[in-house]
Image (tube, rainbow, N blue to C red):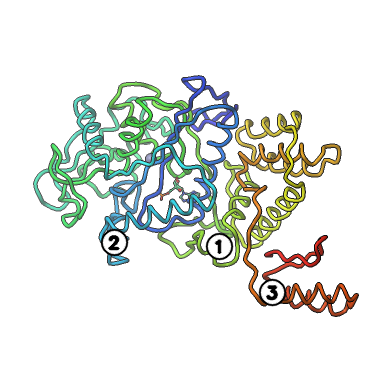
Amino acid sequence: MKLYNTLTRQKEEFKPADPSKVGLYCCGPTVYNYAHIGNLRTYVFEDFLRRALEFNGYVVNHVMNITDVGHLTSDEDEGEDKMKKGAEREKLTVWDIAEKYAQAFLEDMDRLNLLKPTAKPKATDHIQEMIDQIKQLEENGLTYVGSTPPKGGAGGNVYYDTSKFEHYGELAQLDKQNAETCPRVETDKNKKHPSDFILWFVDSKFGDQDMQWDSPWGRGFPGWHIECSAMSSKYLGEQFDIHCGGIDHIPVHHTNEIAQAEGASGKHPWVKFWMHGNFLVLKDKEKMAKSGDNFLTLDTLIQKGYDALDYRYFCLQSHYKKELAFDWEGLDAAKTGRRRLKEKVLSLGTTEGEIHQSRIEGFADAISDDLNMPQALALAYELMDDVSINDADKLSTIKKMDMVLGLKLDEEVKVELPPEILQLILDRNKARDEKDWAKADKIRDKIQENGKWIVKDGDGGTEVIPK
Ligand code: AMP
Ligand code: ZN
């Protein structure tokens, strides 16, 4: 398999440390609100990756964290606490907010047919692991304690001294000079260098913080980045194969994760392959943000009559490294495309035959070429339209392809038709039996008039399917 590695900015041959197993870590959601469809694009890309690895015979140990503490509105230790913001908005405790949105996220994953991670560790269940890693960094001489607490209180926050880590900024290709002199949003006078970041906040940062724990540096809570290096090391070991996230994580979050993991273990490189999904944007190129107005969730799409898998199909049509512009016409086209493909598959019957080797090899080449999913989808259509292959072989081959596409192509959709539609079907069949074509056409138009149903003439008479 060839995968694009952000670390080297090149497509490289992928070889895991253990030839049959892959350790995969994906940064998970911050559970203070619903995931927007931009977030979900990243998880759909990670699901294609996981399925492509499995298709190629690897056993994947897939870990995705749930961030339920420590993430501030800016990735750089500034702004409000996201969880607290969610709790204030809904007049719930931060713990309830975490539970509510973690559940909602898992439901979204299910609806999008995303494979369940092997482990989904929550940050708040791993405070001790984070404290241990910070202690290790302290022992290795990579930390300092801020002299002035930001808002009074006893003792200061614990900072990572990025100037002491020789590989700092390599992932983002930050030039060292630049990282030290070019200020990021800078208001914290305790920082020795602009790229330094907080490992542990003491309670002086947010005195009224609900989520607090005792630590060797005082009561407080962890910085956002430490959870991923601490938990991945617990579940995947000190070094592993692939780490994923959205492109926004490259300059700060992932850069800091590397500094923590390698600074604590002394092992370089921590992760061999870094893969990043590009953004979903709105048509005017505006970024979709959880805090903005342009906030579309999977529920919004479903309420508008789409299936979650229409959105999965929409994502399939573009390569994960390209920015993807969302608009409703595009989603309509995806809906039609998915329906067309599914109809072709359902028309094959249920008898299976042999997997067509050259077709499946072409498909394997596409997904193994840095997840060329648009090409893989085109190959699925080509298979369906190939008249030289019999239906049973086609069915077996498309089912194998669908293990990666994840579109549930051979699953019959069971739709409950409302009684009035059932009556119209009976009336239309009667009109057809009586060869009253004008009446049959009128009833067809009536069934289709609210835009929800499509009438088809099958062997057994009138068939009605959802639009
Ligand atoms: P968060 O819940 O904010 O931590 O984000 C969850 C994931 O969504 C991260 O991997 C982000 O990089 C990713 N992400 C955030 N915004 C977008 C977007 N507009 N398009 C694609 N991925 C995004
Ligand atoms: Zn992370």
- Residue bearing mark 1: 301
Q: Residue at x 81, y 79 (%)?
A: 442
Q: Residues within 10 Å of mark 3 (few under 14, many from 20)?
A: some
Residue placed under numbered mark 2 in the picture: 87
Q: List the residue tagged with mark 3.
A: 421
Where is residue 353, by image quadrant? top right
Disc ID at residue 155? none
Question: Where is 18 relative to 145, above or below?
Answer: above
| Ligand 1 within 8 Å, label 3 CB | no
Query: Could one spot residue 294 in this view of the protein?
Result: yes
> What residue type is disc 2 on?
Ala
Residue at the (32%, 60%) spot, across then down: 86
Residue 253 appears in the rendering: no
Is the residue 96 above or below the residue 279 in the image?
Answer: below
Give the position of the C terminus as an image quadrant: bottom right
> Mark 2 against mark 3, which lies toward the viewer?
3
Q: In the rendering, at what x and y percent does residue 225 appear?
A: 32, 40
**Earlier-in-chain disc, 1 versus 3:** 1
Q: Position of residue 324 (x, y in %)?
A: 59, 50
Q: CA distance from mark 1 to mark 3?
A: 25 Å
Q: Secondary structure at mark 3?
A: helix
* Dot placed on the residue nearer the N-terminal end, 2 or 1: 2
Is 41 drawn above or below residue 241 in the view shown? below
- Nearest to the observer: residue 403 or residue 140: 403
Label 2 vs label 3: CA separation? 45 Å
Identify the mark nearer the N-term, 2 or 3.
2
Give the quarter of the image for residue 258. Answer: top left
What amino acid is labelled 1 in the image? Leu
